[in-house]
Image (cartoon, rainbow, N blue to C red):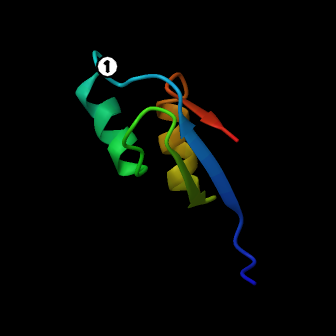
Amino acid sequence: MSDTKKVKVQLVKSPIGCRADHRDTVRGLGLRKLNSVRELEDTPAVRGMINKIAYLVKVI
């Protein structure tokens, strides 16, 4: 059992029509299709990426 915290992120809005760097951030988090979910380590870098595209994702 690892003691690192995890955060689940779900893509709830399409990045089509968004800024290119926001689309790159979505791909950087490993999100591909709409409603796809990824479980990521809760690090400051990941939190910053989530905050940048908060209007596209939902934290579960």
Name the spot of residue 52 as percent of width and height, x first: 48, 32
Q: Residue furthest top?
A: 17
On screen, 32 above or below 41? above
Between 43 and 17, the one lying in front of the other is: 17
Between 45 and 36, the one lying in front of the other is: 36
- Look at the numbered disc 1 and give the secondary structure of its residue: loop
- Number of labels in the image equals 1
Does 12 sit left or right of 27 as displayed?
right
Between 34 and 7, the one lying in front of the other is: 34
Q: Quadrant of the C terminus?
A: top right
Q: Residue at x 44, y 32 (%)?
A: 34
Residue that carries the numbered disc 1 in the rendered image: 18
Name the spot of residue 28 as percent of width and height, x first: 36, 50
Q: Residue at x 55, y 34 (%)?
A: 51
On screen, 41 above or below 13? below
Q: Quadrant of the N terminus?
A: bottom right
On screen, 5 above or below 8? below
Does 33 sit left or right of 6 as displayed?
left
Instruction: Give the image quarter of residue 21.
Output: top left
User: Dot 1: within a 10 Å radius of its alpha carbon, few (fewer than 14), some, or many (20 or more) residues?
Assistant: few
Name the spot of residue 54 as percent of width and height, x first: 55, 28
Which kind of residue does numbered mark 1 sit on?
Answer: Cys
Instruction: Give the image quarter of residue 41.
Output: bottom right
Q: Residue furthest bottom?
A: 1
Q: Residue at x 40, y 51 (%)?
A: 30
Q: Residue at x 52, y 43 (%)?
A: 48
